[in-house]
Image (cartoon, helix red, strand yellow):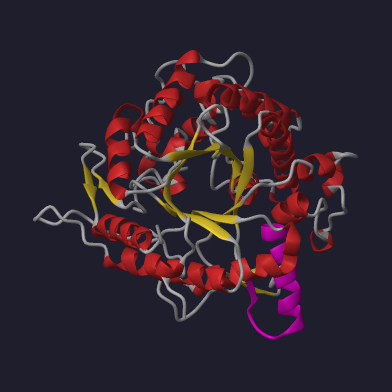
Amino acid sequence: MPNRLDLPAGFRWGVSTAAYQIEGAVDEDGRGPSIWDVFAARPGTVRDGDTGAVTCDHYHRWPEDVALMQDLGIDTYRLSVAWPRIQPHGTGPANPAGLAFYDRLVDALLAAGITPLPTLFHWDLPQALEDDGGWLNRDTAYRFAEYTAAVADRLGDRVPAWITLNEPFVHMVYGYALGIHAPGRTLMLDALPAAHHQLLGHGLAAAVLRERGLDVMIANNLTPVRPATDDPADAAAATAYDALHNRLFTDSILLGRYPDLSAYGMTEDLGGCVRPGDLALIAGPGLDALGVNYYNPTRIAAPTEPGLPFTEAEIEDVPRTAFGWPVVPDGLRELLVGLRDRYGATLPPITITENGCSVADEVHPDGTVPDPDRITYLAGHLDALAAAAAEGVDVRGYCTWSLLDNYEWAEGFSQRFGLVHVDFATQKRTPKASYGWYRDLIATHRSQIPR
């Protein structure tokens, strides 16, 4: 059985973060309000009323965080750029102070031997665009392409590869269908235009990046979908769920078409939002790599009430994270092999852009932060990744979520995913046991590579 040290030579190790979750400084240097600033200010939307106003204060403490990454020995830092820092109102000239912040950060990372891998949209849409309809408005896709050009023109001389979107499925479902995340819409299936317009934005932004000779990625939250039983009704429900969660965001880019969504009462035009030529724009530039965010499989049963064509069923008899998510490492191998089998030669190389777990860890009196459950989690998933590579999947890198404990969206500061503990009152950073484990793993893997 392959293990994590069997990952290929040249494999790139990294960590991931997101701007709103770590930066803070929401009112500084010309940054405009984002949908998350507005959403978090509404009573009852976020646990304990937490906001991202300060979070990890990375906007001011980034040199300390870059030093932590350098000590960790990573190759890649997956960050995100805050659109409201670049265009405070979502349109118009770029804000010089916002660009300058990322300019400094990129230079510091490169000086530390770390390649930045920026995500252009990680859910922090400028509120002014949301006021005009947000991702329900087709025009937002074109504004996204203009924003992409502004950032790429400033940083593209030093940053070779870019992720357009982070988890468009989650943003569409949690933000526009269920209202759990910003912007807090509760549209159910009427949220599907938000998926299409994000993907259209990806295609337009990808063309901008390609024009500048830059590599293009997208980071999708993907899940292996398992029927709850052998009942054909459960199998049909699982197929319907897979189409919505996974294939809507991979078939469109890799095959140039949307999957069958007739189980949702949808035709190929997704209720009229798809125009002629849109799918050619979405698929046209292609991908240089596919970013995969993996946390757990999904178990699906036939619907028990009218509405959606599926019901989520619990995955039983497995460990769970502090968030309550099931821990199934082999699901990562299952997912990657399934992508290879489904897409064949159209599947680009894969980088795991997020994988990690929440643990209820804390600083002990001796100043240490033991987190054995996180180490077990990471080890198991990296073994599964090595198994997928042994089965022929082209995997090029792994970025764990996350470098720092941070603002976990609607859960506020209640969930800790970081390799580094953050005291949010004092901003003290304390590397956890998993940080040392990951650092040693990276060093050991590199030492095995023939020179």
Residue 309 seen in the figure = no
Quadrant of the rendering where the C terminus is positioned: bottom left
Do we see residue 182 in this rendering? yes
Question: Measured along the vertical axis of the image, is residue 313 above or below residue 158?
Answer: below
Q: Is residue 134 above or below residue 16?
A: above
Left/right of residue 60 with respect to residue 107 in the rendered view: left
Q: Residue at x 49, y 14 (%)?
A: 96
Question: Could you say which quadrant of the image residue 93 lies in?
Answer: top right
> Magenta region: which residues?
224-247
Residue lying farthest to the front in this orientation: 451
Residue 86: image location, x then y, percent: 53, 22
Let me know if residue 87 is in the magenta part.
no
Q: Nearest the camera: 269 or 288? A: 288
Residue at the extreme right of the image, as rendered? 276
- Look at 64% across and 44% down and name the residue there: 176
**Majority SS type along the magenta span:** helix
Provide residue 263's location: percent of width, then percent of height: 81, 64
